[in-house]
Image: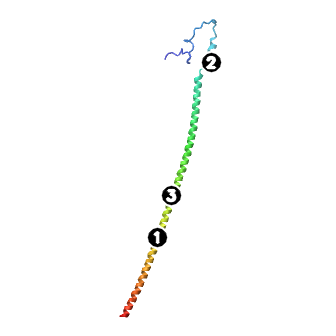
Amino acid sequence: MGSRRGRAGRGWGGGRGRRRRRRRRRMRRTRKRKRRRTMSRGRRRGRRRGRWMRRRMERETMRERERENEREREGEREEEREIGRGREREREREREREREREREKRREERERERERERERERERERERERERERKSERERVRERERDREREQRKETK
C-alpha cells in the first residue's frame, strides 16, 4: 500500500497537500497556526463520525428491533405450540377414555354371554332331569303292565 498522507477528502488525515489549489493570496499575513490546528482537530473529531456512523447506528437499532420482534414471534409460536400440545393431550385423553369405554362394553358383553350360557346349561340339565323322570315313569308303568300280564297268565294257567 502507498502512503496514506495525501488522500484528500477520504478520511485518514489527508485533505491538505496534493489537491491544494494555488490561490494567490493578497493578504500574506501569517495566522497563529496552533489555534487553527486545535480547532480543526476538534471539529474534525465531531465530523468524522458523519453519515456512515449514523447509518451504522441506525442499522444496529434496526437489527435490535428485528431481534426483539423475532423473540416476540418465537414466544408466540412457543405459546401456540404449547396450546397445540395441550389440545393434543386432551385428544389423547379422550381417545383413552373411548378405548376404556369400549373395553368395558366388551367385558360386560362377555359377562352377559357367559350368564346366558350358564342359563342354557341349567335349562338342559333340567330337561334331562325331566326326561329321566318320564323314562322312569314309563318304566314303572311297564313294570306294572308286565306284572299284571304275569298275574293274568298265572290265573289263566
Give, as a three-letter code, the residue at label 1.
Answer: Arg
Report the residue that reaches farthest toward the left: 157
Residue 95 spot, x, y in % from top left: 52, 53
Q: Which mark is residue 92?
A: none
Q: Which mark is residue 120?
A: 1
C-alpha distance separating marks 1 and 3: 27 Å
**Residue at the image position 37 percent from the left and 92 percent from the top:** 154
Q: Which mark is residue 43?
A: 2
Residue 20 picture quarter:
top right
Crowdedness near tag 2: few (<14), some (14–19) or many (≥20) residues, C-alpha within 10 Å: few
Disc nearer the start of the sequence (1/2): 2
**Residue at the image position 42 percent from the left and 81 percent from the top:** 136
Would you say residue 85 is visible in this rendering?
yes
Q: Which mark is residue 102?
A: 3
Residue 56 spot, x, y in % from top left: 57, 26
What count of labels does the image hold? 3
C-alpha distance separating marks 2 and 3: 87 Å
Residue 46 picture quarter:
top right
C-alpha distance separating marks 1 and 2: 114 Å
Give, as a three-letter code, the residue at label 2.
Answer: Arg
